[in-house]
């Protein structure tokens, strides 16, 4: 993706909101929450003002007027500029039509899964699955409610996308936890034995990898061919 002058996804939401009509930051925040957009874009009220300031500095939005509501402090109403509309259009095109490599937190954790005892890993995955399934249930109920109101899907397709991702993650996490519990995951025997050697004999993973055949048998001959920096 292109490097943008203001790359915070919240800036994208601000531009999209101001594309509808001029608003002050608090009104933008209220609108995003009322429409559930804070479920798709991280909304932090403190950082919202920093984003607005950055967008104004770069000419994407401009102050239109200052208003006061009763005894409340004055609020600056902003409007999107022509440059800002062009930036939003280009950004939207990129987000919808261009793939990008995303780094999922779970993927990072799975990369070092053997650092956990197998049973502990399964326990944590089951804990995660329970939380995901609760989100699925909640989101599904919300979708059913909106459908019953004949609320057009075009306004909540992002929530459908999130639900699809949740379902895919739930299926994978449940399956992985089951395979760990049943020792059917490829490498499970190695994983359990490595932990047993460490807990019962104090043989560290580093020592085990120096001579994998000695500790795990000839089926681990391939480990000897691994470059030192990969061990």
Image (cartoon, rainbow, N blue to C red):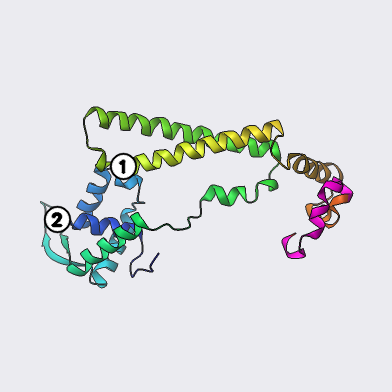
Instruction: Tell whether label 2 touches label 1 (CB within 8 Å).
Output: no
Q: Give the number of callouts.
A: 2
The quarter of the picture where the C terminus appears is bottom right
Residue lying farthest to the bottom in this orientation: 58
Residue 153 drawn at (x, y percent)? 26, 38
Residue 151 drawn at (x, y percent)? 22, 35
Q: Residue at x 57, y 52 (%)?
A: 108
Where is mark 2, residue-wise? 21
Toward the viewer: 44 or 58?
A: 58
SS for callout 2: loop
The quarter of the picture where the N terminus appears is bottom left
Where is mark 1, residue-wise? 157
Q: Which residues are magenta?
A: 214-230
- In the displayed structure, would residue 146 be above or below residue 156? above
Q: Is residue 215 magenta?
A: yes
> Is 187 situated left or right of 96 in this image?
right
SS for callout 1: helix
Residue lying farthest to the right in this orientation: 214
Q: Nearer the viewer, mark 1 or mark 2?
A: 1
Q: Main secondary structure of the magenta part?
A: helix
Report which quarter residue 154 is drawn in: top left
CA separation, marks 1 and 2? 23 Å
> Is 152 situated left or right of 139 in this image?
left
Q: Residue at x 38, y 58 (%)?
A: 98
Toward the viewer: 163 or 96?
A: 96
Report which quarter residue 5 is drawn in: bottom left
Q: Residues within 10 Å of mark 1 (few under 14, many from 20)?
A: few
């Amino acid at each position: 993706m292109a490097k943008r002058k203001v790359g915070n996804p919240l800036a994208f939401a601000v531009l999209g909101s101001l594309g509808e009509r001029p608003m002050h930051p608090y009104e933008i925040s209220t609108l995003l929450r009322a429409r559930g957009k804070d479920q798709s874009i991280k909304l932090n009220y403190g950082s919202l003002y920093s984003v607005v300031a950055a967008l104004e500095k770069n000419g994407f939005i401009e102050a239109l007027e200052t208003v006061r509501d009763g005894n409340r402090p004055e609020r600056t109403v902003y409007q999107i500029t022509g440059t800002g509309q062009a930036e939003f259009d280009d950004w939207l095109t990129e987000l919808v039509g261009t793939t990008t490599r995303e780094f999922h937190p779970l993927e990072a954790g799975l990369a070092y899964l053997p650092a956990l005892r197998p049973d502990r890993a399964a326990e944590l995955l089951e804990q995660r699955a329970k939380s995901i399934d609760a989100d699925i249930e909640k989101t599904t109920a919300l979708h059913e409610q909106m459908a019953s109101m004949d609320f057009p899907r075009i306004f909540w397709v992002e929530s459908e996308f999130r639900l699809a991702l949740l379902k895919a993650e739930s299926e994978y996490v449940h399956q992985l936890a089951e395979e760990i519990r049943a020792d059917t995951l490829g490498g499970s025997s190695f994983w359990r034995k490595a932990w047993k050697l460490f807990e019962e004999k104090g043989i560290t993973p580093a020592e085990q990898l120096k001579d994998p055949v000695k500790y795990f048998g000839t089926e681990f001959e391939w480990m000897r061919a691994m470059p030192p920096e990969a061990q």
